Image: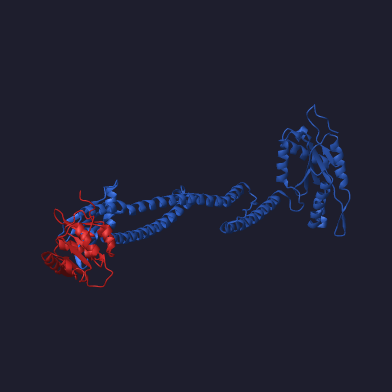
Chain colours: A blue, B red
Amino acid sequence: MFRKSSNTSLQKIFSQSQLLIFALTLGICSLIFVVISIYTMNTYAKQSLNIFSATLSEQIQPAVIFNDPITLQQTLNNHIQQYPIRAIQVINLQGKPLAEAYKPTPEFAWMENLFDKVFFKHPVTRTIKHQNNQYGTLIIYGSATQLMSFFFQLLICLSAGIFIILLIMLWLVHSTYQKLMHSIQPMVNTVESLNLDTQYQARLPSSPIYEFRVISGAFNNLLDKVQRTNEKLQSENSQLSHQALHDQLTELPNRHYFYNILFNQFEHPEKNQTALFFIDNNNFKNINDVYGHLAGDAVLKEMAQRLKKNVRSHDVVARLGGDEFAILLRNIKHYDHLELICEHLIECSKAPLSFDQHQIHFSFSIGVAFSKCATTPEDLIAEADNAMYKAKNLAQGWYITPCLNPDQESSC
Amino acid sequence: MISQVQAQPQLNLPTTTLTILSYVRWNTPNPISLCILNNSQLSNQFIQVNQQLKSAYQIQAVSLSELNKVMCNAVFFSTYTPREEQNIINNLKDTPLTFSSNNTECELGSAFCLYQNKTRTSFKVNLASLSQSQVRVDPRVLLLAKSTEP
C-alpha cells in the first residue's frame, strides 16, 4: 500500500480532484448551455424562416398569378443571396416548378449538410393563394449556415473560457499547495530535529490552519508525555547508577567506582603526579564491640567527612569496604608534599566523636604510593596496601612507599 | 374552402384583366362594375371567366353613348386607338380604371394595356393615366408590368 501511494503527492491529489470537479462542472454547464442555446437558436431560426416564407409568398404572389417566371426568378435569386436559405422552389398546382433558386455549395459541405439535416430536415411550404383561389406552392429549405457559425463561435468562446479557467485552477492548486506546505514544512522540520534531540524539547509550531493546529496540539501533548517519561527514566537511571557506584552509608564512591577512576587516571599523561592513599581504621572492631554497630557506622561517616574536608575538591575519597578508605590525590607537584598531607590527615582524626553521650576516639593508619614510582595501577594498589600495613606498626601512623627507580626522588 | 385539385387559370384577356382588378383597392363600395365598351363577344367571355373565377364583378357590355349614363368602376377598350381612348377618357365625368387590348405602346389612353404574348397575356402600365383614375393598385402588380417589349 505504501509503495502504491508513494508516487502520489498532495499536489497531485489536489490537481486531480480539482480537475475532476472542473471537468464535471464545466462539462455539465457547457452541455446545458450548448443545448439551450442551440435550441433557442433553432427556434428563432425556424420562426424567422416562417416569417420569411410568409413575406416571400406574399411578395411573389402576383408574379405567380400572372405567370411571370422572369420576375419570379429575379425575386428568388435576390432572396436566396440575402437570407440563410438553401433552396427556394415555387411550383404550380400541377406540381410543375415555376422557378427555383439554390445557394452555391459552401466550403464545408458535409458539415453543413449534417447541420441542415439535423435542424432543417423538413422544408417550409406555403400555399400561394389570392381571393379564395390557389395558384401554387412555395417551398423553402432553410440553411444552418448561421446556426453553424453560431455553434463554432460558441465552441471558440467555451474553449477560451476553459483555457482561462484551467490556468486559474492550476494557479489556485499551486497556491493552496504552497499554503499547506507552509504549514507542513515547519512540522516536518521539528519532527526531524526531534529525531536528533534526545531531550524531546522541541515542539511543533502553531499553524494558521485549524486541522494542523489540532495535529500539532495532539503531537505536542504526546511529546510532553514522552519528555516527562524520559526525564523520569533518566533520573532513575542516574540514581541507580549512583547507587551502584557509591557506598550507601558514607555517600562516597565504592571500591568498584574508585578503581575505575584510578585505572582511568593511569591512562592520562598527568598520572605521574597522582598519589594513592590507603587508610584503615586502627580500632574499628573495638569501637563496634564497645559502642555497638550504630556507633561504628557513625565513626565511618565521621571519618568520611573528615577525610573529604581535608583534601581538595578534585581529590577522590572512597570507601573500599569495612573500615578501609582510599584517596586519590591529583596534581602532587613534589614528593615531599605527601608527608605533609599524611601528617595533616592523622591530625584531623585526633578530635573524638560525640556519639550518644560518649566521646569516641578513633585513629587510622595511612599507606601511600606515588604513581610516578609504579608502572601499573595494580602495582600502585599493592604498594599502597603494603605501605598501609607498614604504617600500622609505625608510631606516626603513616608510611610512604619509596620509589625503587634510582632516578626517582628518594622517600623520607 | 378551396378545393385541392384546381385547374390553373388560363391567362387570357379576361382572366388577366379580372386578376389585375383583384389587386385594386377601390374607394367605392361593392359591387365593382366593369364595362366592356362596344364588344359584346368579349363581354360574354368576361362573364364566363367571372363565373369561373368566382369573382363578384358586375360585367356590363356598354356602347359609347351609354358610357356616361351607367356606373362604371372600370372600362375595357378593345376597338379604339390610343388617341381615341384618351379623348373618350377625357370626356368622361367619372375617372374609371381603364384597360385596353388595342394599345401596344401604352403611352396614351388606358392605364393598363394588355397584349398577347407567345403563351399568355401580359400587360403594360401607363402611370399618368393610372394616377388619374384615383384608385390604388397593388405595387407588386405594377412591378410585373412590362415597360417596353424587347
Q: Position of residue A224 (x, y in %)?
A: 64, 56
Query: In the drawing, does residue A69 fall left or right of residue A37?
Result: left
Nearest the viewer among A374 and B41 is B41
| Camera-nearest residue between A143 and A78 | A78
Percent coordinates x, y for residue A344 in the rendering: 87, 43
Of the pair B97 and B90, the residue shown nearer to us: B90
The answer to whether residue A25 is left or right of residue A117 is right
* Furthest-left residue in this view: B41
Q: Residue furthest top?
A: A407
In which quarter of the view is residue A141 placed? bottom left
x, y (%) of residue B24?
25, 65
Vertical order, A336 against B59 (above or below): above
Residue A380 lies in quadrant: top right
Rendering coords of residue B84 (x, y %):
19, 59
- A161 vs B73: above or below: above
* Observer able to see residue A369: yes
Taking the image as drawn, is residue B54 in sight?
A: no
